[in-house]
Amino acid sequence: MKQKPDLSFWKLWNLSFGFFGVQIAYALQSGNISRIFRTLGADPHSLSFFWILPPLMGILVQPIVGTLSDRTWTRFGRRIPYLFLGAAAAVAVMCLLPNAGSFGMAVGTALIFGLFALMLLDTSINMAMQPFKMLVGDMVNEKQKAKAYSIQSFLCNAGSIVGFLFPYIFAAIGLSNVAAEGVVPDTVIWSFYIGAAILIICVIYTTLKVKEWTPQEYREYNPVSEEKEESANWITLLKNAPSTFWKVGLVQFFCWAGMLYMWTYVVDAVSETVWGTIDPATSDYQEAANWTGVLYAIQALGSVVWATLLPRFKNVKIAYSISLVLGGLGFLLIPFCPDKYLQIIPFLLIGCGWAAMLAMPFTIVTNALQGYGHMGAYLGLFNGTICVPQIVAAICGGTILSLVGHHQSTMMIVAGVSFLIASVCVGVIKK
């Protein structure tokens, strides 16, 4: 078996560049879904149920895409056809979702339409996102893998910053940030339109610049033959997965449960803490929603900065654990920062945890999977450690909200405790 060659910086960059556009779409979804459904008329206690669909689609779509792409060989590549089809579908749905309240439908009908559009959007985003992780696993050697995922993390955060800032920027240049009751503001609608355009441009760039290996080249650089890769099912793969796969998954559970509660409740939490309202019909609430987008961008910026410092830690586990502790402290601070500028501090801390969540799990797991084959299928299954905790957290969200006094800001404390538990669980991982 040949050693995978070192790739130049720009080849590593091209492998992941389309991720910039995909992450803009993902940022628009994660930053505005609660805002959209609250504007359409969703009750805060049922809000978390709308967040079941994104991880549910992820746990269904990503293993399928991974397994199918393991067995796909076309003139356009192995992973890229799925990447392109997913992005094209995402573009179409991004033009529909924010208009759920603009078609004159009743509240219940508009919520159902929005829910169906969200399901399609997350299905297509997952279909477009997973191939980028697989391309790195396929074509990058172990020595450069951390660098490749760091580039991917940078592009991920850069895309997040752009996507999160769009509504705030469009409000600043004069687009309306308020609309009739039940209608999503123009600032959000046009954010989705522009995000869709950038997504397809970035994905076209990657499809033109990246040339995947042929089946013969793949077999030369990877230890498991194509025939053997086709022989195992998901249950067999999970039974044979290295212990590191499951130990990292335990950390992932508490991290992603915490993130789900942030995405679901943080707009209301910031609006309640700083502006003193959770009524989506008010201009103050919509202003709080735009400012939350800015805070998300600050989180992503903090993540970029922290990601440059992570390689300086000699012990990967210590770096991972400290990052999650900082993220947990950030969540705990949100309800205690009554000024919108003070909110910058907790979101910078959350960015430290987010940086570790983006880079470290996949680096640790893909290194542990060397020699196992089925890289695409395994990474698709590993995505379950991201999706399952979000599904569990979404199901329990309304109940927990009632237990903590019906205050969305208190859910940030729940998220912070979840991150602190995750930091403790890092201790079970053996490098």
Image (cartoon, helix red, strand yellow):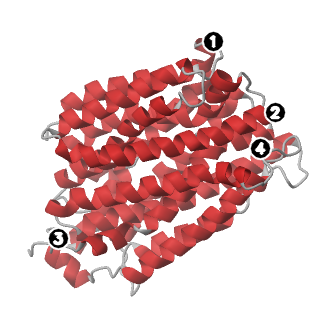
Disc 4: CA contacts within 10 A as few (<14), some (14-19) or many (>=20): many
Q: Amino acid at mark 1?
A: Gly
Q: Which of the two marks, 2 or 3, is nearer to us in this view?
A: 2
The reply to whether callout 2 and callout 1 are in contact (CB within 8 Å) is no
Indicate the secondary structure of the residue bearing disc 3. Answer: loop
Please give the residue where the numbered disc 2 appears in the rendered image.
282
Please give the residue where the numbered disc 4 appears in the rendered image.
111
Indicate the secondary structure of the residue bearing disc 2. Answer: loop
Percent across and percent down for residue 362 are 29, 51
> Mark 2 or 1 closer to N-term?
2
Q: Which of the two marks, 1 or 3, is nearer to us in this view?
A: 1
Q: Nearer the viewer, residue 5 or 250?
A: 5
Please give the residue where the numbered disc 1 appears in the rendered image.
405
Q: Nearer the viewer, residue 201 or 349?
A: 349
Distance, label 1 to label 3, CA atoms, is: 54 Å
Q: Is residue 429 visible?
A: yes
Distance, label 1 to label 4, CA atoms, is: 26 Å
> Mark 1 or 4 closer to N-term?
4
Q: Is residue 53 visible?
A: no
